[in-house]
Structures are given as C-alpha cells and as structure tokens.
Amino acid sequence: MGWFEKEKGSDEWWIRYADQYGHIRREKVGSKSLAKKVYQKRKTEIRENRFFPERLGHRKDMLFADMSKLYLEDHSKVNKRSYVTDCYVMTRLNETFGSKALSEITTQDVERFKGHLAQSVAPATVNRHLALLSGIFNKAAAWGKTKLNPIKDIKPFKENNERVRYLTEEEELILRPQIPDQHWLKVEVAINTGLRRGEQFGLKWPEINFPTRTITIRRSKSGEMRHVRMNDRVMEIFRGLPSRLKSGWVFPSETGQTPLDANNFINRVFNPALERANISDFRWHDLRHTFPFNYGRCRPANASGADGAQDHKDDCSIQPSFSDSYPRSSQQTVRIEPASSTRTSTDEVNQSRRRG
C-alpha cells in the first residue's frame, strides 16, 4: 500500500512511492483520504513524465489541507461560533483543494469550483464556501504561510434575501409519515418555537425552565441573551425526552456527551424525508419561517401556497391572548393587527406574547 500512518492514531498519513528513476520517496500529506489522492496524483505524474522531484523540496508554502487544519484549530475553534459549520464546509473545500499547495491554487481554480458547486447548492451556500476560503487565505497571509490570495478577485453570487418559505398544513401532513416519531419531535420543536438550528440543537437542560415556561438562548445571533416562550406542545415534548435523565444536552448524540450534529441529522434524516414526500425548495431554516404562521394561520397578501414566497415586509403582527399555549394544531383565537414595522421576527412574536 502506498500510504501509511506513521504513528497509529495520529491521523498524520504519509505516502511512499518509487519515482521514474527507481528512487523511493516519502511525503507527509495529512488525512488518509488526502494521502490516497496525493499518492494517485504522484503515480500519474510519474507515468506521464510530469513528476519533478526537485520541486518537492522547494515548496514555499504549505498544503491547503494543512492550512485548513491549522485554521480550524487556531482560529475558527477559538474565535468563531460557526466552528461546527466551518468543519462541515471545510470537508468540501479539502476535496477540491486539499492536495494542492496554497501557491498552486489560482483564481481560475476557484472560479471553476464556484461554478461546479453552484450546480448543486443555492447561491448563498456557494458564498459561504467562498467566504471560508477567503478567510483561510487571509489568515495564511497574516501567518506568513503564503503571499497570494486567489479569492480577492472572485465576486460572490447575488443572494435572494426576499425568499421566505414555510411549511404548509398540507405539506406537514405529507411529511409527517416520512420521519420517525423520535425525530419528528425535533421538527415540532422547531415549528413551535422558531428557534434557529444552532440554538435548538445546542440546547442544554439548565436552559429549559419549566416553571416559567421559557427557553433561554444565552447567545443569540445578535450576541445577546433572549428568552423564548414554550407552548403546551413544547412543554410536553421536553418533559417526555429521555435525555432529561441521561445527558446535559436536550438533543444529545448517541454518547450523550456532545450535542447531536445538526448537519448530520438534517442530511441523513430531514432532507431524505423531504425527497420522499416530494417537497421541494425547503430547508430546515424554513421551519423557523413557519413559526409565525402557527398563530391563527396568518398569511401575507402575496403568499401563494406551498410554492409561494412570503415577504417579511408584508407580515402581519400577531398578538395572541394570554393563555400561553398555541401549538400548530391549536384552534385558539388570536388577534391579528396590521404590521407596525417592516419585519416580523421570532423576538417580536415573543415580545407581543408577553405584552398580551
């Protein structure tokens, strides 16, 4: 085998091969998957007479794979709340750029990556990849690892920030049988609280206050603490979760020592269920958009059913009465008033509930 782990468990893989002159060469590469790719690349270069061993000892900067690992450990993990998402995005970046030295990555390479990725994901997702790639090269330059930044001339896609999608009652009835009971509870919590994905999957039990019927988000997207009111259905779900007695996390992983990986859950459970239900153009975040419509089925004037787009500027302001349980299935009466602002958010709904 042409690749090996020099120290077992270190995740530092090397490759071993004979060049066109019969000389045995070894290179430290990085991860096992990357080692396989670099090994095949070297064999191809040797076979096509494109291998120049003298260049190996004169690399002026590091491999992208090594820089990405350094970026995650020394910067993202320490400074960014999006560390888990960065790890997920980095996997795709390493698949494309991992075996190249930083100086070998060109603007054309990035443009090609951008166009290829845009064929399978939304423009906003492509932009998140480009932003992370830019961050890596900025840090590489600041840390003296490279002098070039092939991202600086790359323009991001224009994003459609007006898109607002929600789960209709009809779609909910179709989707429900496609998701096992223990996983559907997570969907219900999202629908009935409007929590962001990271907020929901990162919940700890001390943040759930049953006597006051509130969920404490210690650090919201704005960086501030906020409180979300629980309705009867959310209270019922949380009281019945087995993790109350087994883990500090509301939605734990199998070991109970860490929170459930949201990306893994969505890709393995939620997205396949959407496909089986033939529900298109829908993301987990859209469950947050569904939250305001739980109260009296408020619909903006420009909504057009499952395929329509809800413009937040046309949202109505919902002020339910003081009985604090409004699950989606509830038939309780709410008072609908004209919007007093240009945007309705989860926080505004919570504030209106407290005023009621």
Image: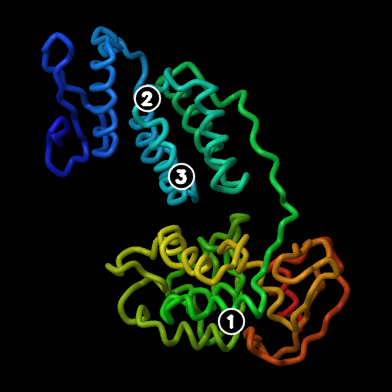
Question: In front here: 135 or 175?
Answer: 175
Q: Which residue is mark 2?
A: 100
Label 3 vs 2, first from the N-terminus: 3
Q: List x then y, in percent, for residue 300.
A: 82, 70
Q: List x then y, in percent, for residue 178.
A: 48, 76
Is 248 rendered above or below residue 322?
above
Residue at position x 41%, y 30% in the image: 97
Question: Which of label 2 and label 1 is nearer to you?
Answer: 1
Q: Which residue is mark 3?
A: 89
Outermost residue to the front:
48
Query: Based on the displayed image, in which of its 4 quarters is residue 232 positioned?
Result: bottom right
In space, the residues marked 2 and 1 are separated at their CA atoms by 48 Å
Residue at position x 15%, y 30% in the image: 2
Residue type highlighted by circle 1: Leu
Question: Which of label 1 and label 3 is nearer to you?
Answer: 1
Q: Which residue is mark 1?
A: 173
Q: List x then y, in percent, for residue 332.
A: 72, 92
Specify few, some or many for label 1: CA neighbours under 10 Å numbering under 14, 14-19, or 20 or more: few
Left or right placement of residue 99 versus residue 137 in this view: left
Label 1 vs 3, first from the N-terminus: 3
Q: List x then y, in percent, for residue 5.
A: 15, 36
